[in-house]
Image: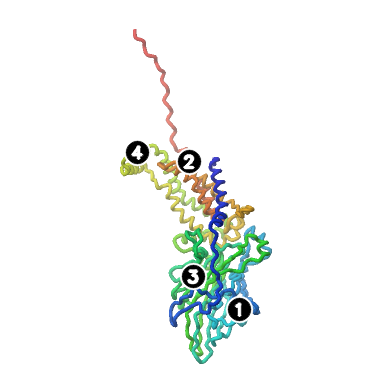
């Protein structure tokens, strides 16, 4: 690498460090609207018998608490080999899920900051428990339920002010499954009107105190496709960068909500209504979570000062319950890791494609699934996950070797034919149509293809995006290490630059250096302007900027890919030099005989 390349790389890195502080200073984020409303006793309006409900977006119900702060709380804890479930009398729902097999902190820096052996949790610090019922006062009353431990689980029950009796039952299953039953009993001798309800399925919360929530989302499925609502949707920024008018609420569905989920990068809660009775609508709100204490901020300065969550609920219209009858709804609930094999089995069992929460839908999802299964297969054979990524990269490179080799040779032939092509372009410069025709005829005669250099890149793009999709949510990589990288699912940060609060990530820098090296070895395209050639040489710096804070697993794949491409170019160049015919020797110089003098 020459001196100019090193200078450009250093300047680009400095600009990368200054970019985010500069943008935040020029365009500070606009604070979202408040989540607390003075009065909201009827958040949903619907005519009796209507199949869809229309939430009143301007007046969402208060979510700070279901009960008075000084009300005593009773909790019941159930656990199995997978998780620990804490139920609360405040709202009669599932307050917290602790996943016993997954630690809260996995990276080097995270483990140093974590002074406890906490495990990963779901619904963490959420203002209301999962399966709390929101709506009018007649649905909540004082919000205090009576908890009873049963032979198979927990029962929460309460008499409502309108004369109804509300009972919820929770039974634990295997593979992180829970069966939840919500039952309204009319024990009177007259019909009772049940006002519109919001049944909270849970709140998407950050994994840890320094999780910025970029991969946190709410998702729902209508039987044909899944829709994901995340932080950028709620932020509603102009062009994705500049401050806009934040959204605080999302409503979707029309009697077709097959399932809904709240999730962060690696864990999810999925609630599935009965197969023959999908939920009418789904609602999600952006809410503020309790901020970290001063002690927590001192212990971990990277803690997010204003954490947020996405509280999600099924919406049901009002209905009338006849005397001495009941209305019952049963749900399957998955609360656990986003592990593809487990979710795929449950999706096949329930027939509802709930594995789409992995983000493996669409064209690139096929490649993501194949890569994940391949990586897990190699890991089962004894490979570490880092070595599995390297092995997959080598296998892919070997599969595409003939194509890239032919492409490299074609580009070299085009570079050798460049003088003749320039001569044709100069000869027909006044007739562009004929010039292009003659150039194409010349390339056809010499069996070169101008698209040969781009074809291998285009074919491998789906694999790259498949890797990106897979590594973004593969819990298998959480805590998997490689050299200095302690967590392949996160950036390989080794140092935070003081003052700038900017992370130093070596793998993306190595990736950028290998890309510059590769571009130096790539033959220039014939006819390309010298300025364009310079721009192409420094194009890798753009990828360095984009991928700098991506997972180290992805940058490891790209770095190995670059090194293999460089090795292939070197081998192709060496083999071409060996197979080239030896240059013909120059003819021997003949002695010059002086001309004879005339007599």
Instruction: Kindly identify which numbered label has been placed on residue 67.
Output: 1
Q: Position of residue 189 (x, y in %)?
A: 51, 92
- Foreground residue among 170 and 287: 287
Q: Earlier in the sequence, mark 2 or mark 4?
A: 4
Q: Residue furthest bottom?
A: 189
Query: Which SS class for mark 4?
Result: helix
Q: Position of residue 142 (x, y in %)?
A: 59, 82
- Foreground residue among 451 and 320: 320
Between the C-alphas of marks 3 and 4, the distance is 61 Å
Q: Which residue is mark 4?
A: 424
In this view, the mark in front (2 or 3): 3
In the picture, the quarter occupied by the N terminus is top right
Q: Earlier in the sequence, mark 2 or mark 3?
A: 3
Q: Earlier in the sequence, mark 3 or mark 4?
A: 3
Is label 4 in contact with label 1 (beta carbons under 8 Å)? no
Q: Which residue is mark 2?
A: 573
């Amino acid at each position: 690498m020459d001196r100019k390349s090193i200078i450009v790389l250093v300047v680009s890195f400095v600009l990368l460090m200054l970019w985010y502080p500069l943008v935040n200073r020029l365009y500070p984020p606009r604070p979202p609207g408040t989540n607390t409303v003075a009065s909201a006793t009827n958040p949903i309006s619907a005519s009796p018998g209507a199949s869809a409900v229309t939430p009143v977006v301007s007046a969402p119900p208060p979510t700070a608490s279901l009960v008075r702060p000084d009300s005593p709380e009773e909790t019941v804890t159930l656990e199995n080999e997978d998780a620990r479930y804490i139920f609360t009398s405040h709202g009669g729902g599932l307050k917290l899920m602790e996943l016993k097999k997954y630690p809260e902190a996995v990276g080097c820096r995270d483990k140093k900051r974590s002074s406890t052996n906490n495990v990963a949790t779901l619904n963490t610090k959420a203002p209301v428990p999962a399966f709390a019922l929101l709506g009018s006062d007649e649905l909540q009353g004082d919000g205090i339920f009576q908890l009873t431990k049963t032979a198979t689980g927990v029962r929460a029950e309460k008499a409502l002010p309108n004369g109804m009796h509300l009972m919820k039952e929770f039974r634990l299953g295997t593979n992180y499954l829970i069966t939840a039953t919500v039952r309204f009993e009319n024990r009177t001798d007259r019909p009772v009107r049940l006002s519109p309800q919001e049944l909270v399925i849970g709140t998407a919360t950050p994994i840890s105190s320094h999780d910025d929530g970029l991969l946190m989302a709410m998702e729902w499925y209508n039987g044909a496709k899944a829709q994901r609502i995340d932080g950028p949707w709620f932020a509603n920024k102009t062009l994705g960068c500049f401050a806009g008018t934040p959204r605080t609420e999302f409503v979707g569905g029309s009697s077709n909500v097959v399932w809904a989920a709240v999730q962060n990068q690696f864990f999810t809660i999925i609630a599935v209504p009965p197969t023959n009775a999908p939920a009418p609508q789904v609602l999600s709100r952006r809410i503020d979570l309790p901020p970290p204490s001063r002690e927590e901020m001192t212990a971990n300065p990277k803690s997010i000062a204003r954490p947020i969550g996405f509280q999600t609920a099924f919406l049901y219209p009002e209905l009338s319950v006849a005397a001495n009858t009941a209305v019952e709804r049963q749900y399957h609930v998955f609360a656990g890791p986003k592990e593809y094999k487990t979710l795929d089995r449950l999706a096949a069992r329930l027939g509802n494609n709930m594995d789409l929460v992995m983000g493996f839908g669409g064209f690139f999802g096929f490649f993501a699934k194949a890569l994940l299964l391949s990586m897990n297969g190699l890991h089962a054979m004894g490979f570490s996950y880092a070595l599995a990524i390297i092995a997959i990269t080598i296998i892919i490179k070997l599969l595409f070797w003939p194509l890239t080799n032919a492409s490299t040779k074609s580009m070299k032939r085009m570079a050798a034919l460049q003088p003749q092509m320039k001569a044709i372009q100069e000869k027909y410069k006044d007739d562009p149509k004929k010039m292009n025709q003659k150039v194409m005829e010349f390339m056809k005669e010499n069996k070169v293809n101008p698209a040969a250099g781009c074809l291998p890149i285009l074919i491998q793009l789906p694999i790259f995006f498949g890797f990106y999709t897979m590594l973004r949510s593969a819990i298998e990589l959480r805590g998997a290490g490689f050299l200095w990288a302690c967590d392949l699912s996160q950036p390989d940060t080794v140092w935070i630059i003081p003052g700038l609060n900017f992370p130093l990530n070596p793998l993306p820098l190595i990736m950028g250096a290998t890309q510059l090296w590769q571009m130096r070895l790539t033959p220039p395209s014939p006819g390309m302007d010298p300025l364009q050639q310079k721009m192409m040489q420094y194009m890798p710096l753009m990828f360095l900027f984009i991928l700098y804070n991506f997972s180290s697993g992805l940058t490891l794949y790209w770095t190995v890919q670059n090194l293999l491409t460089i090795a292939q170019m070197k081998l192709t160049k060496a083999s071409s030099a060996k197979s080239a015919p030896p240059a013909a020797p120059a003819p021997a110089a003949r002695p010059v005989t002086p001309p004879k003098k005339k007599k």
